[in-house]
Amino acid sequence: MKKNTGKIFAIGDIHGCYDKLISLMDRLPFDLHSDTLIFLGDYINRGSQSKEVIEYLLKLKQSSENIIFLKGNHEHALLEYAQTKDQEYLRLLRSMDVEPTLKSYSDAKFQSLSDLGFLPPAHLDFLNGLLTYYKTDDYLFIHAGVIPGEDPDGCSLDRLLSVRDTFLRYEHKLGYTVVFGHTPFEMPLVAPGMIGIDTGAVYGNMLTAVLLPDLRFFHA
């Protein structure tokens, strides 16, 4: 847990939307020295510029120690398939539109998913270093949400990073607010105990960031 010392910015699902990411970052009044910037995962798949997104995030990471990168279910499925060779993860990756990601990496072959050989070492290290969640005094930042009644540390990542209705229907009395992505909304969701900021950038809608504790939204 980190003590709140400055403003916190969180950014929702990017999904290879590099141009929207750059535009959004240009609009954020982010102080590299005092503020914290948290990315909620799902950097890859569906969109056409996953490689460019990760390359940009790697450079951004070098500019400040106050930038946190969380794991999304898309990154989790990619890493799990390479580790386990479980065909269920391969089918999942197909449904997640992994092909544009491969294409962004010089038209990598589908077979290269089995060992992630298409990824530069720095990109693979980035994916392997993603955090499951990040907590402050007032907020829990996580890709998809929490499982009612369960400690996030005790949940399988398959469930934790893909939960939707179970989390959204739950009346939260956690003592903190859950800031999440994963479930796309036309506009950011603000409800008791939760803030949802996946606004479907890859589906033609906007990429969203939230500034906390101000609850001010930025879009691109």
Image: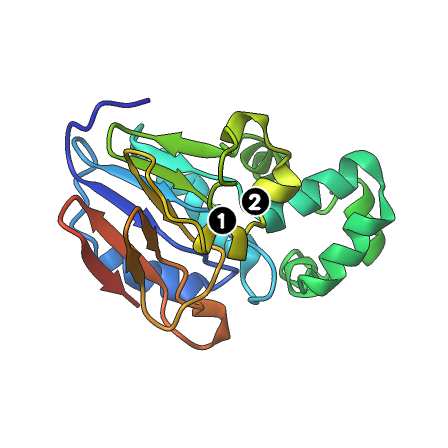
Please name the amino acid that badge 2 sits on: Leu
- Residue 88 appears in the picture as rendered: yes
Which image quadrant: the N terminus? top left
The front one of 46 and 136 is 136
Depicted 55 relative to depicted 80: above or below: below
The front one of 40 and 108 is 40
Depicted 194 relative to depicted 130: above or below: below
- Residue 119 appears in the picture as rendered: no
What distance separates the C-alpha of mark 2 from that of mark 1? 5 Å
Which image quadrant: the C terminus? bottom left
Q: Quadrant of residue 91?
A: bottom right
Residue 75 location, x and y as percent?
Answer: 61, 46
- Residue at screen point 56% across, 54% down: 51
The residue under label 2 is 161
* Horizontal relation, residue 198 to residue 193: left or right: right
The residue under label 1 is 144
Residue 8 location, x and y as percent?
Answer: 22, 40
Taking the view exactly as shown, the residue that stands out farthest to the bottom is 204
- The reply to whether discs 2 and 1 touch (Cβ–Cβ < 8 Å) is yes
Secondary structure beneath dot 2 equals loop
Q: Quadrant of residue 26?
A: bottom left
Residue 128 location, x and y as percent?
Answer: 60, 32
Please name the amino acid that badge 1 sits on: Ala
- Residue at screen point 72% across, 47% down: 118
